Image (cartoon, grey):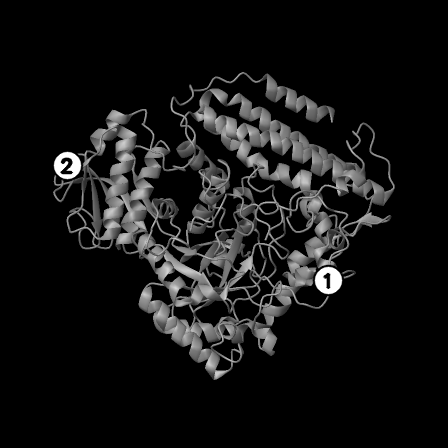
Amino acid sequence: MRVLKGALAAVVSLVVVLAPAHAVEEDGYQLWLRYRPLANAGQAQQAAKAIVYPDKATPTIQAAIDELRRGLQGYTGKAPATGTQVSAGAIVLAKAGQLPQGFAADALADLGREGYLLKSATVQGKRVTVIAANEDIGLLYGAFGLLRALGTGKQLAALDERSTPKLQLRVLNHWDNLDRTVERGYSGQSIWNWWELPAIRERQYVDYARANASLGINGTVLNNVNSKAEILTAPWIAKVAALADVLRPYGIRVYLSARWSTPLELNETKTADPLAPEVAAWWRAKADEIYRAIPDFGGFLVKANSEGQPGPQDYHRTHADGANMLAAALAPHKGIVMWRAFVYAAEKPDDRAKQAYDEFKPLDGKFAPNVLVQVKNGAIDFQPREPFHPLFGAMPGTPLMMEFQITKEYLGFAMHMAYLGPLFEEVLKADTMQRPGGLTVAQVLEGEDHGPGEHGQRPTGMAGVANIGSSRTWSGSHFDQANWYAYGRFAWDPRGSARAFADEWAMQTFSRDRQAVTRIVDMMMRSREAVVDYMTPLGLHHLMDTGHHHGPGPWVDNLGRPDWNPTYYHKADKGGIGFDRTATGSNALAQYAPDVARRWADPRTTPEELLLWFHHLPWDYAMPSGRTLWAELVARYDRGVAEAEGLRMRWQQLKPAIDERRFDEVAQRLDQQVSEAQWWRDASVAYFQSVSGLPLPPGTRAPARTLEQYKAIKFPYAAGHH
C-alpha cells in the first residue's frame, strides 16, 4: 500500500504543460470526425485545393467527395473545389481503369473490392494525392483513410499507404428493441425511431453511417437477438428498407435478428420444425419478400435455444439443421446466416463454460457454406477477462466469426472508463496452439485454419454488440466512443494494435498536442486492467449482482438455476476459492489444444490473470509475489481502487488541454468510478473474508460497511435491464 500511495503522489506532483483548452465547448456528437484546423493548415490547403473524379459520381462516390470537402474545409479553413480535370494540389479519386499515367495496370490487383491505395504522385506534371480502389466503396474508405491520416499528423506529400480489410463481414449487433429500449444499452434510447419510420429518416442515421464507414464497418443488425416476430412482417420490413436506403451509399448492409418461431407465432405454420416442408417454404417466401424490398439485405442473425429462446432443439433437431434451413432460403439472394454459439441447456450443467463447445464441435463441417457460427470471445459471457473461447481453432470445417461486446455490460456500464482495445487485442493475439507453430484467434477468424471450401472463398467476420444510442455522445460517455472506434479498426485488421488505435482516436477526438495525447492514451491503456482488478481479479468471473449486472454480488446463491449464481463460479468456501476446470473438476481444459491444456492444468504455469478461472486453490496458496492467495486477492482489489484514483488524477492534469464541457463530463464519471471501485472492493473483500474466516492482511483497510449493508443495495430500475 505504501508503494501504491507513493505512485499516486508522484502522479499528483507531475507538472504538465499542455496546449490551451479549445475555445468552443463540444458535446461529443461529432465523434472522431471533428476535423479541427491543422497546425499546418496552409500547407495542407495547397496540397488539397481540389477534389477530382473523372466520371459521374455514384451515391457512394458522392459520399466520398462530400466527406473530403467537409473534412478538408475543417482542417484547412477552405472547402476545396470539385471537378473532373487534374490540377496541381488536387486529390484524385480513381478506380481501376481510371488510374493516372505512371501507375501500373495491376496496381490495385491485391486490394479486392474494399481496399484502397493512398499515394502522393506526379500526374501530368502536377503533384497530386491519389485515392485509388477497385470499387466505389474502396474510394469511400480511402477518403476516410486520407482524412484520418491528416487528423493524426501525417503529411499528404508523404502518403504511401495500401489498406485492405482482413475480414469480409464487419458488423454491429444492435440489441435494440422495437419500443426503442436497448437491452444492455447505457446510451439512451435506440437511435432507430421505429415509430416514425419509414416516412421520417433522421439525419442521425446518415451520421451513424459516416462514423461506421470511417472505420470500415459494413453491416448492422438492427434489432435485438432476443427478437420479436413482428420485425419480419410487412410494415416492419418497410421500416427496415428505409434505413437500408440511408445506409447503402456508405457500404453498410442491414441484417435482422430473426426469432426462430416467427412463422408459428404469426399463425402461418403449425410448427417451427426446420425439417418440416411448410416451415422451409415459409422462410423461402419471407426471404423473397425481404429481398424485393431490400435487394442488398445481408441476412439473419439467430439466437436459438439459449436463455429461453426457441430453436431447432425444441424439435430434436441440431443447430446445423436450423441454420442450414435458413441458409437455403437466403442462398439464392447471396444472404448469410450468423448463428450464435452462445447457448446453454435447460438442464443443470456441470460447467456452463463447456456447453457451446459440446454442442457445436460435433457439428463441425455440417453447416451450409453461407453460415457463420458467431462465437463470443470467451465461454461465459463478456466478462472483464476471460480466456479465449475453446471453439476457436477447434472447428476448421466451419467459418467462425468473433462476437465482442462493445457496450460494457459487466465493466461499469457507460460510467467507468474501460478502454476495451486491450481486451480485444488480448483475445485476438491468443495462441490456440491448434497447429505446429501456433494459430492465433485472429488467424482463425481470417480463415487460416481452413481452405476456401468447395464453393469458393469462405466467409469471415467479426461482430460487436453496439454501445450506440440517442445520447448526445452516442455512447453514453466520451471515452466509450473509443470502444466503438477500436472495434471497427480491429474488425478491419484483427492483428492491429490497441495502443495505436487509442492514439488515433485521441488525436482525432481530443487534441493533437503530443503530450496530451500520450497522457490520454496512457489512461486508456491502464483503464481496463483497473476494472478487472477491482471487480474480478485473478481470474474470478461472474461476480455481479442479479439481473441488472451493476455492482458486486458474489454472495448471490438463490437464483433459479446454479449457473445464474455468482457462487457457482467462484466456489469460495472455508478451504479456498476458484472454479476447478482441470481433470479433477469439470475438465473444461480438455476442450483446448493439448499444449494449452497442459500449461493451464498446473496453477504454477497458469497465467495469474486466469488462475481462479481454472483452479480452486487454498487461501494460503503461495503466489509468485510471496503473498498468500488471500493477501494477493486483497492486494489486487486495492490496486484496482488505486488505479481508478490514478485515472481521476491524470485527468485533472489534462484540464488545460480539454474543452470545459467534455472535461467536466469525464471528471464526473471518474468521480463515480472511484466511488464504485471502492464499493466493489469493499463488498467483495467483506464477503470473501466472511467465507474464509481469515483476518485482513496487515495494513489493509477494513470495508466501510458491513456485509449485510452491501447485500441490501438494490437497483430495480437500472439502465439496460430488460
> Which comes before the other along the chain, label 2 or label 1?
2
Q: Are marks 2 and 1 in contact (CB under 8 Å)?
A: no
Give the vertical position of 497 relative to 566 (above or below): above
Q: Position of residue 7 (x, y in %)?
A: 65, 24
Quarter-wise, where is residue 350 in the image?
A: bottom right
Where is mark 1, residue-wise? 587
Question: What amino acid does circle 2 point to?
Answer: Lys
Residue in the foreground of this view, choosing between 626 and 552: 552
Q: Secondary structure at mark 1?
A: loop
Q: Nearer the viewer, residue 300 or 46?
A: 300
Q: Is residue 447 visible?
A: yes
Q: Secondary structure at mark 2?
A: strand
Badge number at residue 124 = none
Q: Is residue 59 above or below residue 344?
A: above
* Image coords of residue 521 (percent x, y): 50, 32
In the picture of the structure, the residue carrying the numbered disc 2 is 126
Neighbour class for label 1 at 10 Å: few (<14), some, many (≥20)? Answer: some
User: How far across and how far down the image is residue 605, in percent?
Assistant: 71, 49
Q: Position of residue 460 (x, y in %)?
A: 44, 60
